Amino acid sequence: MSNYKKISSNIQQVIIDNPKTPDEKLIWLNINNAGKKEIEFLRRKYDFDLKYLQASSAKSIAQRPKVRYRGEYLFIILHFPVIDGGNIRAGEIEFFVGHGYLITLHNNNINELNSFFNLCKKGDNAPLSFELESSAILLYELLEKLMFGCYKLLDQNSVAIEDLERIIFGEKQQQAASQIMSLKRNIINFRKIMQNHKNILKNLMEMKSSLVPAKKLKYYYRNLVEQAKRIWEILENQKEMIDALHETNESLLNYRISDIMKTLTIFSVIVFPLTLLAAIFGMNTVNGMPFMHTENGFWIIIVVMMIGSLTMLLFFEKKRWL
């Protein structure tokens, strides 16, 4: 059974209460865009460290994830990838985890978190936390959903890489260049977000629960560590693929430029002697200039130029420069 309550426009509460265990209940406070009012609400209701409350303000963004044990509660900052205008950016979540409660603070931009909260709000009996009523288990389930959300973005990257490969080998190098930069940025941002998750989750394996045996708790969080490893391995593969495609695109682009330069060079080499010959016959020296008073002298000069051009083309062909 689940009881939902909207405390304010930015604070929602769900009480997960299993009738089979009347002495236990689990509270999940979900806070978005935390400001002074929300921080003051937490300060009055819970004895949290002020610096952690200030770090949970919507205006402050942590540069790295962290885990801090504070006796009766656990403070965690984690980042997860979100799509913003086609770009992957870090969405931050702060967690306060204590006996019988879980508090999440975020900027309302992580769909997986909101979806799981709505599932619990409906009173669905499926979540594991309904059976065990442990904040550590609720945290595990939420992190699992957030991890699965990462796979969706990884799949989008894979599709984009396949499309990019078709564009590159379709000889659209200029179009591919901008897409390569966009994909590279997304993969780099994704890696920055996920690089410390494995270590953070390993620390969470040491959590204690009065409701769940330590061995069972470690089993659940070990699954999260494995998920983080798999995500990192896929990111490594995607990074290698995009680097390889970048090199391929650069090679094809350089080849096209070289081919264009070769054509222009051959054209210049052929035209330069013809220009020189035309300049010589254009001199104002009447006496001694060949073909000056010859009938059809102009056409004779044109034929000489054409023979010279043809000779150079045959020479280039023999040297296999064409």
Image (cartoon, rainbow, N blue to C red):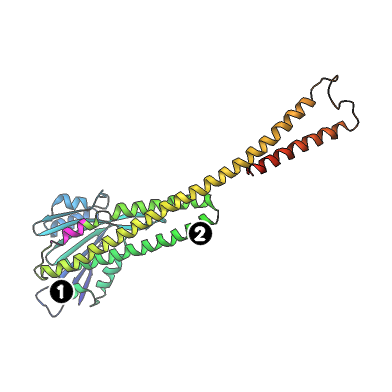
Question: Which callout, 2 or 1, points at the residue further toward the start of the chain?
Answer: 1
Depth check, front residue: 185 or 71: 185
Badge 1 element: helix
Identified at 13% across, 60% down, the residue is: 45
Identified at 26% across, 64% down, the residue is: 227
**Picture quarter with the N terminus:** bottom left
**Residue 98 coordinates in the image, percent (x, y):** 13, 62
- Image vertical order of residue 73 relative to residue 315, above or below: below
Q: Residues within 10 Å of mark 1 (few under 14, many from 20)?
A: many
- In the rendered structure, the answer to whether residue 276 lies left or right of residue 64 reads right
- Image vertical order of residue 278 relative to residue 113, above or below: above
Q: Which mark is residue 166?
A: 2
**Residue 123 coordinates in the image, percent (x, y):** 24, 76
Q: Which residue lies furthest to the right in this view?
A: 295
Q: Residues within 10 Å of mark 2 (few under 14, many from 20)?
A: few
Badge 2 element: helix
Q: Circle 1 sits on which residue?
A: 132
Depth check, front residue: 14 or 241: 241
Q: Which amino acid does label 1 sit on?
A: Leu
Q: Which mark is residue 292?
A: none
Q: Is 160 contained in the magenta span?
A: no
Q: Which amino acid does label 2 sit on?
A: Arg
**Residue 301 coordinates in the image, percent (x, y):** 82, 32
Q: Is 202 contained in the magenta span?
A: yes
Dominant secondary-structure state across the stretch colored magenta: helix
Part of the protein shown in magenta: 199-206
Q: How far apart are marks 2 and 1 (CA)?
A: 50 Å
